[in-house]
Image (cartoon, rainbow, N blue to C red):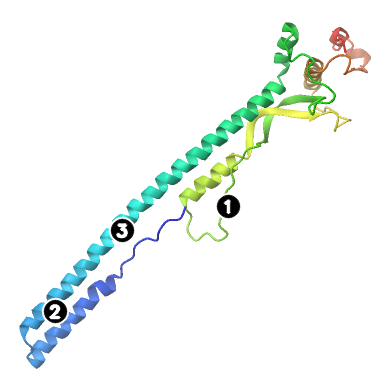
Amino acid sequence: PQASGQPQINWLNVLVTPFISLTLMIVLVLVMGTSAVMLIMSGLMSIVSAIIAVINYRSQKKQHKEMDQKIKEKYHAYLDKVANRIERAHYLQLHNMLSANPSPDECMVIAENRRCQLWERRPSDSDFLVARLGTGTVAATVTASFQQQQVIIKENPLETEAGTLAKKSKTITDAPILCNFISIKQTGVIGNRSDELLLIRNIVTELTTSHAYDELKIIALIPEQEKEAWAWLRWLPH
């Protein structure tokens, strides 16, 4: 946003110049005997000039304030419009990601009710063997851009708001974090053993829900002491 410059007034010229002119006229009247009428006229003109200068300054200051307020209102309206468009785009992106990559609990519901999402992915699909690991922050496909000035003499609050909006638009929170097991062929899980088992179970649940048993095969090499923990695998058709 481009705002006009703040009106300025040189009080030295406004006050001192008429004072000097009036002083010179007084000297001329006293020393050279010039008519007092000239002194009165000169004094009135000096006072009127100073008053006009002050009135002009106050008028320009008022106009500047009104113009500055209009600029702020229009720019805020523009930022609100951009923010709404980004919010809608982010909502659609998140909705699509959540629909395409349901949680393990949602996968159980899909399997139990034989919904259309069951075994819907094919080897030709771009999301074949893509599983949801959890939720987090991902890059947004629709973002706002803001060109920051190279040299900032005085910070502009409107530009700060625009920069904040652009920064926030770069990411989406609470979105599925995905792993593509085609591009990442060897994957390890490290951490607390109970958390490891839960994550692996969730991944297997998601993959076996979205992939047909004739296109995805699961082979499990299980430690003897964990056979019971993995007994549920035998009930999968994969």
Q: Secondary structure at mark 1?
A: loop
Residue 216 horizontal/vertical position (percent): 87, 18
50 left or right of 199?
left
- Disc 2 packing (10 Å; few <14; some 14–19; many ≥20): some
- In-front residue for pair 213/40: 213
Residue 147: which disc? 1
Q: Residue at x 71, y 19 (%)?
A: 103
Q: Residue at x 61, y 32 (%)?
A: 90
Say which label, 2 or 3, has the lower sequence index: 2
Q: Amino acid at mark 3?
A: Lys
Task: Give the quadrant of residue 106.
Answer: top right
Q: Which residue is mark 3?
A: 61
Q: Amino acid at mark 1?
A: Gln
Q: Amino acid at mark 2?
A: Ser
Say which label, 1 or 2, has the lower sequence index: 2
Task: Give the quadrant of residue 198.
Answer: top right
Query: Disc 1 vs disc 2: Cβ atoms closer than 8 Å?
Result: no
- Disc 3 packing (10 Å; few <14; some 14–19; many ≥20): some
Q: CA distance from mark 1 to mark 3?
A: 30 Å
Residue 175 horizontal/vertical position (percent): 67, 28
Q: Secondary structure at mark 3?
A: helix
Q: Residue at x 31, y 58 (%)?
A: 61
Q: Residue at x 55, y 61 (%)?
A: 151
Q: CA distance from mark 1 to mark 2?
A: 55 Å
